[in-house]
Every structure is written in C-alpha cells, then in structure tokens.
Image: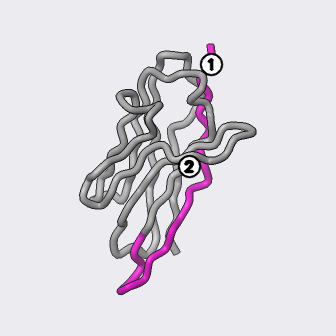
Amino acid sequence: QVQLVESGGGLVQPGGSLRLSCAASGTIFSIESMGWYRQAPGKQRQLVATVTGGGLTDYLDSVKGRFTISRDNTKNTLYLQMNTLKPEDTAVYYCNAVASTGPHKYLEVWGQGTLVTVSS
C-alpha cells in the first residue's frame, strides 16, 4: 500500500503565498509521475501541475509563472509553491502519484486533499 498525505493548505489573502507538501509512504520502489490537481465547488477536478521522475514539469495555463511544482526524491515528497494567489485559486488541492510497488507493478494513488482558500 502507498499513502499520500498533503499539508500546507489554509486561508490566505489575494496576492499571498502558500506552499503545499505531499509525503508518500508505504511500499515504494520508485515514484514515477507526481502531480497536483484541484477541485473548486461545483466544478470538475483539474490538473494544476505535474512533474515526471526526471524532473520535467507542466502547468495549467492559468498558474504558469505563479506556481512552481517540485519534488524531493530522497524524501518521496512533492511540493507546490503558490505565489500571487487569486480568489479563483480557491479549491481543494489533491496530490497524485504513480508509484512502482514492485517489478512491473504500478499503482495510482490520491491524497485526501487540502483546502486552499484565497479571500480578503
């Protein structure tokens, strides 16, 4: 089993910053891709940012230049640095990972989500 635990959400004023963390634990041989998704009330879950095992990143257009995704492979931890936050960034943010749990065994795992609220 692999578990993902997010932290770092909260209430922040527009223009502020937050840093989300996602720690993976369990029987992990390696973690392939990792990413952050978000879901605002009444809307579908959307991909915010991804990072491959080799460090290649991709971002939702609306967060480019404001958000930075990174990972520490030694700690199996994913981060999302969010700057210049806007009210439209308000959502529950979910961590996602594709982990190898053994030879030719892969598992997609989701965290429980952390709420980010951007409001004055």
Asked if marks 2 and 1 touch (Cβ < 8 Å), the reply is no
Number of numbered discs overlaid on the protein picture: 2
Label 2 – label 1 distance at C-alpha: 20 Å
Measuring from the top left, give residue 20's x and y in whole percent.
46, 40
* Rendered position, 106 above or below 41: below
Left or right, 4 with respect to 101, comes to right
Magenta region, residue range = 99-120
Measuring from the top left, give residue 49's x and y in whole percent.
43, 45
Frontmost residue, 64 versus 26: 64
Q: Residues within 10 Å of mark 2 (few under 14, many from 20)?
A: many
Disc 1 designates what residue?
119
Frontmost residue, 77 versus 109: 109
Res. 41 mark: none
Question: How would you classify the magenta stretch by its main secondary structure?
Answer: strand
Q: Which amino acid does label 2 sit on?
A: Tyr
Disc 2 designates what residue?
94
Measuring from the top left, give residue 40's x and y in whole percent.
66, 37
Instruction: Determine whether the residue tagged by mark 2 lies in a helix, strand or loop.
Output: strand
